[in-house]
Image (tube, rainbow, N blue to C red):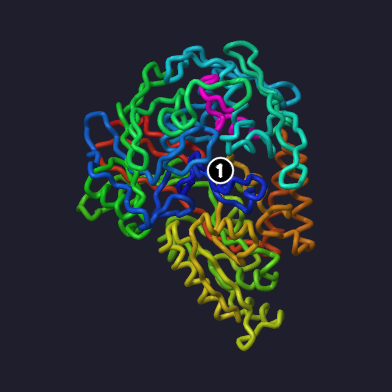
């Protein structure tokens, strides 16, 4: 699971964290994340404060050193199978062990987001925009010494679709990016459902080094999905969890002790719950990684992670929100994708360290259950708050106030268009609170100081609770001024999801990091559909109908080309405005990722939340 500012390749984690892909296409919860940046700016996923369960620190700590070993702290490490949903620590391991057909560009001052060939050397696209034919590299070996062939990829993607161990099958079986396949009808809990028919995925090994994959329909951002971590190849038949294969390894060994991929590192040892040791892979097809080893210490407690950093037991690290002081940041330069680079300090040890921050393409917000909270109350609370206060007081200035569902970097026209549209059209007060208007709206709905409305807000107690406690106090203060009696409760992320699915929450924290750079990946949660936790369908309106129509327009224009792109862009804006009108969310902020490192390591600047944050190009 991923932090708001830690999305990376775990961005999808929140969406299916409950293990129920249908309802977990909720109203947004990820990734990452993936999908990896500092807890100072975010909190969606990785625990960022002291928790029950201890620090996870072993008696023996790994000292940062110049002997070719890079030392890091991670919050957990359990399952590394590409088809499993992972927490941030497990995903960090997987990102180094596995690789994909395509990858996002690397390097400090990356200027674009177009995926590049990785395990592939080239690809061709059919005239109808559906069939991708990939030419594979002929110099790639798995960590067990076997050669990568197209048949390995066929097997790996069939596992993704059909294995009982797969939690990521919607990646290729649902949504705009969908590999063609057949379904069959099964009865599940007394209801008939369409499910994937094993063996029907339209992926073919034309020969050892040619792979052909056919989509259900053209999709404008398909290459981003071919770069997605769940599509990483593993050796054909290595585990026997799909028809036709007995398996060469027990699944538990493969998934948690000795995963086999084609990435720059392979696992040397795993001490479950304590430590993962990676060693540079023999015969790696790419440039030899910088560090010979990467030692990842499992440390759940944020204060302990900070202490390890201050004691120089790690080379690259993050700061918990409670330890971050924005006055200690000094920015020297801004790069092409908005990355800021400079220094931070002094730390408690007196040292000043290197610092960088980047756009995470993430939106955090508060969800209203429209079947429990009536529209005037939702709108009034939107009038009453100023999102700038959430950023400044809750997240210490790390991030941007959120006014749209789509993050600025993917909003049609980019950040400038995002800001202009919000400033000119956001109905509840752009960078200001309108308490008088909020109170008037509540009075029109019959709520007075003697007869206030009642609402319960549930926020995380395991994801940067100090920040959310401050934000909850801000919202409660504003609510009291508009005839709204707000009760604040706290719960772990998992409990919030369970209770939201059951329909037991009025308003609660959630967020989503994008899988690919398009508003469609965020706005899919805003459409009024069955299973959406917003439950907009249960409070139908002209706005919800407009949102549904706009979403249909988007779905009818998923192919490439300028005309389709323009139609999507117009529909994105229509959906944003419809969501505003009915106030199904109270937007929070767009987090930025952060990273800190000492001078004795040379760390490339991370480009965006769409990029893997790997350490194979770190110099010690």
* Magenta-tinted stretch: 221-241
Res 210 quadrant in image: top right
| Residue 477 placement, left or right of 265 | right
Residue at image coords 69%, 24%: 199
| Pick the front one: 508 or 128 | 508
Q: In this view, does 482 lie above or below 358?
A: below
Asked whether residue 415 is in view, the answer is: no
Residue at image coords 46%, 16%: 141
Asked whether residue 2 is in view, the answer is: yes
Q: Where is residue 381 drawn, in percent x and y? A: 60, 71
* Mark 1: secondary structure: loop
Q: Is residue 453 above or below residue 317?
A: below
Q: Which residue lies furthest to the left in this view?
A: 350
Q: Where is residue 3 drawn, in percent x and y? A: 46, 49
According to the picture, the residue beneath numbered tag 1 turns out to be: 12
| Pick the front one: 595 or 428 | 595
Is 235 in the magenta?
Answer: yes
Q: Where is residue 220 drawn, in percent x and y? A: 67, 34
């Amino acid at each position: 699971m991923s932090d708001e500012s830690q999305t990376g390749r775990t961005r999808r984690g929140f969406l299916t964290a409950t293990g129920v892909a249908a309802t977990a296409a909720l109203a947004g919860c990820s990734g990452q994340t993936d999908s990896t940046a500092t807890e100072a700016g975010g909190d969606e996923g990785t625990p960022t404060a002291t928790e029950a369960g201890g620090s996870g620190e072993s008696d023996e700590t790994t000292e940062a050193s110049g002997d070719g070993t890079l030392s890091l702290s991670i919050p957990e490490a359990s399952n590394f199978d590409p088809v499993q949903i992972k927490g941030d620590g497990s995903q960090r391991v997987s990102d180094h062990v596995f690789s994909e057909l395509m990858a996002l560009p690397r390097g400090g001052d990356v200027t674009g987001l177009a995926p590049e060939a990785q395990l592939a050397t080239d690809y061709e696209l059919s005239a109808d925009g559906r069939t991708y034919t990939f030419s594979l590299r002929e110099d790639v070996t798995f960590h067990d010494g076997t050669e990568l062939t197209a048949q390995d990829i066929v097997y790996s993607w069939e596992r993704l679709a059909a294995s009982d161990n797969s939690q990521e099958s919607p990646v290729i079986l649902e949504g705009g990016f969908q590999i063609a396949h057949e379904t069959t009808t099964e009865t599940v809990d007394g209801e008939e459902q369409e499910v994937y028919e094993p063996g029907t995925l339209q992926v073919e090994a034309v020969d050892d080094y040619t792979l052909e994959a056919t989509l259900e329909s053209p999709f404008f951002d398909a290459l981003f999905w071919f770069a997605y971590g769940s599509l990483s190849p593993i050796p054909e038949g290595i585990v026997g969890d799909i028809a036709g294969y007995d398996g060469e390894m027990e699944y538990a060994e493969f998934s948690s002790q000795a995963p086999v991929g084609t990435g720059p590192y392979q696992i040397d040892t795993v001490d479950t719950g304590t430590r993962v040791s990676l060693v540079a892979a023999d015969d790696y097809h790419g440039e030899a990684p910088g560090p010979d080893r990467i030692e990842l210490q499992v440390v759940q407690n944020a204060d302990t992670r900070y202490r390890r950093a201050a004691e120089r037991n790690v080379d690259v690290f993050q700061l918990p929100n409670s330890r971050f002081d924005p006055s200690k940041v000094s920015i020297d330069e801004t790069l092409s994708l908005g990355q800021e680079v400079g220094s931070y300090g002094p730390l408690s040890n007196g040292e000043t360290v290197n610092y960088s921050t980047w756009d995470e393409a993430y939106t955090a917000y508060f969800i209203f259950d429209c079947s429990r909270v009536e529209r005037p109350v939702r709108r009034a609370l939107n009038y009453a708050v100023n999102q700038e206060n959430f950023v400044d007081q809750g997240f210490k200035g790390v991030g941007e106030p959120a006014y749209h569902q789509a993050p600025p970097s993917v909003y049609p026209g980019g950040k400038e268009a995002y800001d202009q549209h919000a400033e000119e059209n956001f109905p509840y007060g752009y960078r200001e609170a309108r308490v008088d208007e909020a109170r008037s709206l509540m009075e029109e709905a019959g709520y007075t100081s003697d007869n206030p409305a009642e609402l319960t807000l549930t926020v995380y107690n395991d994801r940067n609770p100090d920040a959310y406690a401050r934000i909850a106090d801000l919202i409660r203060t504003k609510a009291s001024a508009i005839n709204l009696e707000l009760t604040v409760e706290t719960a772990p992320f998992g409990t919030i999801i369970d209770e939201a699915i059951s329909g037991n929450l009025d308003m609660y924290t959630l967020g989503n990091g994008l899988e690919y750079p398009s508003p469609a990946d965020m706005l899919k949660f805003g459409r009024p559909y069955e299973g959406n936790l917003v439950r907009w369908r249960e409070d139908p309106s002209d706005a919800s109908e407009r949102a549904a129509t706009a979403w249909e327009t988007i779905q009818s224009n998923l192919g490439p080309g300028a005309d389709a792109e323009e139609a999507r862009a117009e529909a994105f804006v229509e959906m944003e405005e419809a969501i505003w009108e009915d106030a199904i969310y109270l937007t929070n902020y767009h987090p930025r990722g952060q990273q800190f490192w000492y001078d004795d390591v040379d760390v490339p600047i991370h480009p965006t939340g769409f990029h893997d944050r790997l350490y194979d190009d770190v110099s010690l």
